[in-house]
Image (spheres, rainbow, N blue to C red):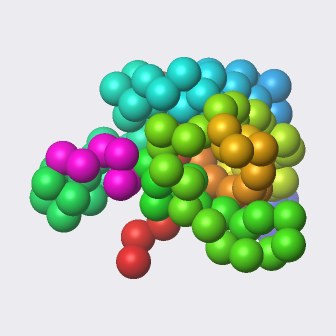
Amino acid sequence: MRKFLCIIVILALSLNVFSQLSKKEIKAFCDEFAGYISEGNLENAMHYIDQETREQQIENILLGNTSQFFSELLSGNTKNGKFFSPDIKHIKKMKTVKILSIDNGFSEVSFKITLTDGFSITTTLTLNVNSKEEMVIIPAVG
């Protein structure tokens, strides 16, 4: 009975590991999102955000103000450590820097955002990475 239980636990753990996406798949998703942000294409970038967030934060709280939503989502730190929320119109380029972690179906990804005035910020976003169909950015709430 003990061996059977151990086999079930090992099988369950291995299924969880294999169900997560690879770093390559996560990076491709992030690069596409960053490309849309770089182009100022908020409509397509919106498809990368989880549906519940779109309904609650953008439609109900921000009353459809997608620019404010993305400005807050992409907030990060400057090189000297100051917190900064970029104006979407001033983003020159967004680039995926590094996948920081993949754990229990979630991933932390670091991005570099270069502004039109030459300054840059680094921001980290959380993703649901259980499957390609479910992969979305999960913004912080609060």
Residue 117: image location, x then y, percent: 70, 44
Identify the residue at horizontal 36%, vertical 46% (top origin): 67
The image shows residue 47, relative to residue 99, as above or below, that is: above
Q: Nearer the viewer, residue 61 or 101?
A: 61
The kind of secondary structure the magenta stretch mainly shows is helix
Residue 54: image location, x then y, percent: 28, 47
Numbered label tally:
0
Outermost residue, front direction? 117
Query: What stretch of residues is rendered in magenta?
Result: 64-69
Residue 30: tell me if it is visible: no
Q: Nearer the viewer, residue 37 or 49?
A: 37
The image shows residue 58, relative to residue 90, as above or below, that is: below
The image shows residue 122, relative to residue 142, as above or below, that is: above
Residue 27: tell me if it is visible: yes
Quarter of the image where the N terminus is located: bottom right
The image shows residue 6, relative to residue 137, as above or below, that is: below
Identify the residue at horizontal 40%, vertical 31% (top origin): 42
Residue 11: image location, x then y, percent: 75, 46
Residue 94 lies in quadrant: top right
Residue 116: image location, x then y, percent: 66, 38
Based on the picture, tell me whether residue 66 belongs to the magenta stretch: yes
Identify the residue at horizontal 75%, vertical 34% (top origin): 95
Identify the residue at horizontal 44%, vertical 48% (top origin): 70
Q: Nearer the viewer, residue 93 or 29?
A: 93
Based on the picture, tell me whether residue 68 belongs to the magenta stretch: yes
Residue 114 lies in quadrant: top right
Quarter of the image where the C terminus is located: bottom left
Relative to 135, 114 lies left or right: right
